Amino acid sequence: MRVLLVEDDGLLGDGLQTGLSQAGFTVDWVREGRLALHALLSETFDAAIIDLGLPDGDGTEVIRAYRDRGGTVPVLVLTARGDIGNKLTLLDGGADDYLVKPADIREVAARLRVLLRRDEGRRVPVLRYGDIEVDPTAYAVRVGDQSVDLTQSEFKILHALIRSPGTVLSRERLEEVVYGWDGEVDSNAIQVHLHNVRRKIGADVIRTIRGVGYVIGRQEGHG
Ligand code: CA
């Protein structure tokens, strides 16, 4: 699950990024509203955590601008205690939930999971391709009757591929999915993960399109 964290406080942001990464999320962190809006509109996230007091404006403006452009990713707001009076404005403005700072990292992770589950409920709860099932909420994978243990990185790769069958994802795209923007990535890390995923779910499910990337199912535009 890839989360955009929008927080200008270095200490808080660092704590959230570390804690949420340990809880299994891929976290990309920006410190300004302008960058947040750009990231939300140009990249794929499963959720966003947005601080209200940003150096270049109010987080609510970011949320409103994002919703106005049709953005649907669930948003969890972090707010200072003094701002709690405007929670209705927040929810009306497109936020899905809010927490008062400083928030316990376990509670942030739990609220995120609720938002993701609600969001998955609106879409397809369990993703299927052939006899493969991926349950994003439970982090579970099955092949036929067999449940399969994937590492977090392997799960993120399979989830990204299976949720858009026919779409080829480049190695760089998969690196973003697994590591976010600033992960230090070995050039063959994705290939190693893919090798393991294939070993666990079957070698033929994920196809390599040489020089382009990886795909589950028939490639769009090629019959
Ligand atoms: Ca702030």
Image (cartoon, rainbow, N blue to C red):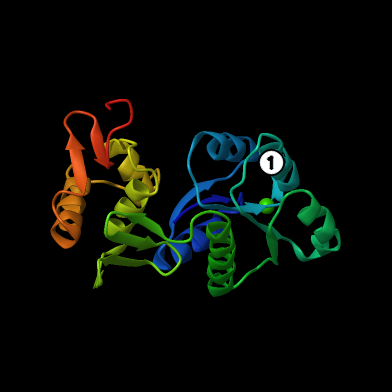
Of 5 and 199, which appears nearest the observer?
199
Q: Can the viewer see residue 204?
A: yes
Instruction: Establish if 77 lies above or below 43.
Output: below
Q: Residue at horizontal 40%, vertical 43%?
A: 181
Instruction: Please identify the quarter of the rendering in which residue 117 is found.
Output: bottom right
Judged from this view, the residue extending furthest toward the right is: 85
Instruction: Please identify the quarter of the rendering in which residue 96 is found.
Output: bottom right
Q: Can the viewer see residue 55?
A: no
Q: Is residue 115 left or right of residue 146?
A: right
Task: Tell me which amino acid carries mark 1.
Answer: Arg
Please state, as top left, top right, bottom left or bottom right, where the N terminus lies in the image. bottom left
Q: Position of residue 134 (x, y in %)?
A: 35, 61
Q: Position of residue 176 (x, y in %)?
A: 36, 43
Count of numbered circles in the view: 1
Q: Residue at horizontal 74%, vertical 46%?
A: 60
Q: Position of residue 118 (x, y in %)?
A: 59, 62
Q: Is residue 26 left or right of residue 72?
A: left
Instruction: Establish if 70 lies above or below 83.
Output: above
Q: Residue at horizontal 19%, vertical 59%?
A: 201
Of 56 and 100, which appears nearest the observer?
100
| Number of other residues with Cα within 10 Å of mark 1, as a class: few under 14, some 14 to 19, many 20 or more | some
Of 198 and 16, which appears nearest the observer?
198
| Element under disc 1 | helix
Instruction: Establish if 42 lies above or below 155.
Output: above
Of 215 and 32, which appears nearest the observer?
215
Residue behind mark 1: 67
Q: Residue at horizontal 47%, vertical 63%?
A: 20
